[in-house]
Image: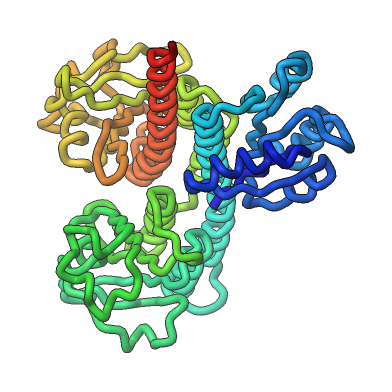
Amino acid sequence: MTRVLVVDDERFFREAICDVLAPAGITPLVAESGEEAMEHAADESVGVVILDLQLPDMHGLEVFRQLRECRPDLRVIILSAHTDQDSVLEALRLGAYDYLAKPIHEEELLLAVRRALETFGIADGWTRLRSRIHKLEGVLAELWARVQSPLGPSVDTQVRELAVQAASEVLGAAKTSLMLLDEGGDRLRVAAAHGRDLDPARMDPVQLGEGVAGVSAAEGEPILVTDLSADARFADRAGSDRYRSGSFAVAPLATGARALGVLCATDSRGGRAFDEDDLALLRILAGQVAQMLGPAALPEADPREAALARAICEAVTEEIEPARVLAAVLRPVAEILGAAPVSLYLRDASRGLLVREAECDAGQRTYRPSLALARGLSGGVLESGSLVATDAPEADARFDPEVDTPADARPGPLLCGPLRFRGKILGIFRAFPEAREDASPRLGELLSSALSAAVRNVLLYRSLVETIDEVAEARREGSP
């Protein structure tokens, strides 16, 4: 849990602030001086600092400068008397998150702290995700190096063992397994496992279409279960001896239309539930592993895939304003796809349309401002949640030239995938690559996962800001 550091030399204000935060479920930590504040700020559980400008050993501005140097991720709320306005303005110019004037208004304090905690959590989540993508990139490089090396045990054996180790490392999962369809094609058998005492050969098979792994393999769709006991899809299995964890992330292994099996992660370290970011990383790993285990000649690893996921994370962490975040995440996509037009559309149920939310195209082609919900390949993605990746969309019977092209109506290679949020499909992304080979399912799946994560964080931030604005408006209307 992220904690709030309260720095004030006056005991009355320290206790008053803690008395407001603690009942709201916010864990406070206190410091009486600048030196003590710097010691506590080294604790990574601290995400927000409420900093009084008047301290006995050094001025609050100096403390703030030192905090910025050692922990630039911290959200610092300045606490001041009305006579400190020049110092407040200087702190804001230096990057302070917000300020509060003494005497403290309890509701205003809670609003400021909650907003700071939310924005710290979003930024921290993206920073951690970026770190995990770097880790995934290294893991995939090692996997491909082993696959392309003629030395050592068989390729399949290496890939299976490294895949479950990689899933455990990247997702922070205590137990992972790779399950492959048997020769009959109707049961999944454990081919490799990590974190389990039992030999994989002695583990029970799973019938295709049954259980979390069986359903994922049968439908060819990733599955995220945050709490098995509360998930209606698997309610009848909540008490099964097979499941010792209430949270799962499962991604199918597939090459084209052929399902090979699934990659599973359970028992997240620390007891947290797996989330959409975990599932996105597992899908990327599973897609690569499927290519390595597939019967066809092994393709060369595409270094752009991990680079693209990393670039999207970096774009999000560099932007602050939600209005600019989505445009920022599309920029590296357009660049990596050769200045291809890329856009995001979100569902507007009241108008019966998909409405363009963000775009980037290097100025070459224009976008349609909205799309019909149920027309063309694009509408099909929204309804089914299935990716479309084709170098000749006009050859598909579902193709609609008024929907499945940019505004110039010129058809070309198309990548169109769902944007998922909490188990629902909120909209779609579309890209029109210049190179036909870039309209690949593997690249499309990566974009669907990474862009869904970006949209999810932007929507959460918007919801937070709207709530704060509503509360502030209610306060203004209720003021005498």
Determine which quarter of the picture holds residue 103: top right
Closest to the observer, 323 or 111: 111
Question: Residue at (57%, 74%) from the top-left corner?
Answer: 151
Question: Residue at (10%, 31%) from the top-left corner?
Answer: 397
> From this viewpoint, which residue is outermost toward the right?
57
Locate residue 3, reporting x and y percent.
Answer: 60, 48
Closest to the observer, 330 or 59: 59
Locate residue 316, reporting x and y percent.
Answer: 53, 32
Say which quadrant the C terminus sits in.
top left
- Disc count in the image? 0
Q: Is residue 39 left or right of residue 3?
A: right
Q: Is residue 53 left or right of residue 475?
A: right
Question: Is residue 374 at least partly visible in the picture?
Answer: yes
Closest to the observer, 316 or 261: 316
Question: Residue at (41%, 69%) from the top-left corner?
Answer: 267
Determine which quarter of the picture holds residue 101: top right
Locate residue 300, reporting x and y percent.
Answer: 48, 52
Q: Identify whether 190 is placed above or below 304.
A: below
Determine which quarter of the picture holds residue 113: top right
